[in-house]
Image (tube, rainbow, N blue to C red):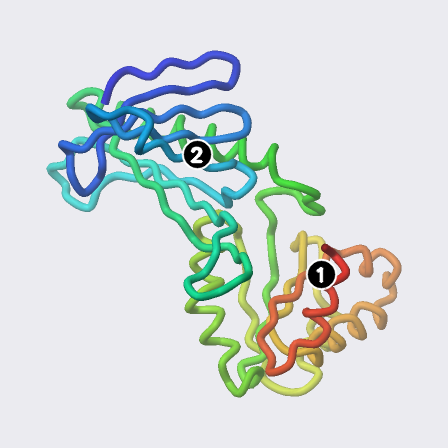
Amino acid sequence: SSPPSSHRGYLYGEFSDPLNDSVRCSVSLTQSSLTIQRICSVPGRTRTVFNLSDCIGCRAHRGSERADVGAYFTAYFYPFKRRWMSAGLTRLRVEQCFRVALVQDPLTNLREAERWAQAIREGSQLQAPRREVRRPCRTMILVNPHSGRGQALQLFSGHIQAMLTEASVPYTLVITEHQNHARELVRKADLSKWDALVIMSGDGLLFEVINGLMEREDWQEAMQTPLGILPGGSGNALSASVHHYSQ
């Protein structure tokens, strides 16, 4: 890697591809975007720009091999893209990883990777639209394992869990065990431990949570707790309606 330059929130550096050290890219970070330019003899044809508003997180880390003195930073983006054979747009995951090897000292390289990761995280937080809760957001996630014909828990472990890790969101997973389990839990919980409650189920579990909040002595304050819905049922009519009217 080449020594980076920085001024007024701008960063520039040259890094190698983690899978092929002979492939190098110039990387520049502004307040709103991350631009990646592959260094080659034909400039301009391999330039990619990612909006920081589409970035959910970035982490710095060491390589898996102990002898590797380099460090890495990996950014996670979810830009809108068109699916294959589909007319609509949806968010698809894009992972961008870079190897930092300024010197032969692993700790120096890791500090530089952490500097980039922190700058990307801060930029993404500034660009994120209409966030109702602070970051990092302490989240209680309630999952009904029987929702969606028994697929809700599989959807969480297969999709949601990785996104939470990439976004560095601390969470506690609660798998409901019986009817009104969530209602009883929310009615008695110390809500000061959580910044948001997220329900992954059909419509029924959300109603349980709302009823539990309304049955508290401090219900007026409790009802100010942000609620999130991850569709995990069969029909998900409420989630579809909320999504439609929030556009």
How busy is the neighbourhood of tag 2: few (under 14 within 10 Å), some, or many (20 plus)? few
Q: Residue at x 22, y 41 (%)?
A: 63
- Secondary structure beneath dot 2 equals strand
Q: In the displayed structure, would residue 13 be above or below residue 199?
A: above
Question: Who comes first in sequence, dot 2 or dot 1?
Answer: 2
Q: Nearer the viewer, residue 1 or 194?
A: 1
Kindly check if marks 2 and 1 are in contact, taking CB atoms under 8 A apart as contact. no
Q: What residue did someone put label 1 on?
A: 227
Q: Nearer the viewer, residue 216 or 145?
A: 145
Q: Is residue 85 left or right of residue 39?
A: right
The nearer-to-camera label among 2 and 1 is: 2
Q: Label 2 is placed on what type of residue?
A: Val
How busy is the neighbourhood of tag 1: few (under 14 within 10 Å), some, or many (20 plus)? some
- Secondary structure beneath dot 1 equals strand
Relative image position of residue 91 (x, y in whole percent): 51, 55
Relative image position of residue 141 (x, y in whole percent): 59, 65
Q: Residue at x 84, y 56 (%)?
A: 221
Q: In the displayed structure, would residue 217 be above or below residue 18?
A: below
Q: Nearer the viewer, residue 159 or 30?
A: 30
Q: Residue at x 46, y 62 (%)?
A: 161
Q: Which mark is residue 49?
A: 2
Q: Is residue 229 left or right of residue 143?
A: right
Q: Residue at x 15, y 34 (%)?
A: 21
Res. 163 in view: yes
Q: In the displayed structure, would residue 64 be above or below residue 150?
A: above
Question: CA separation, marks 2 and 1?
Answer: 33 Å
Which residue occupies the extreme left position in the image?
67
Q: Is residue 216 left or right of residue 23?
A: right
Q: Quadrant of residue 205?
A: bottom right
Q: Is residue 162 left or right of residue 22?
A: right
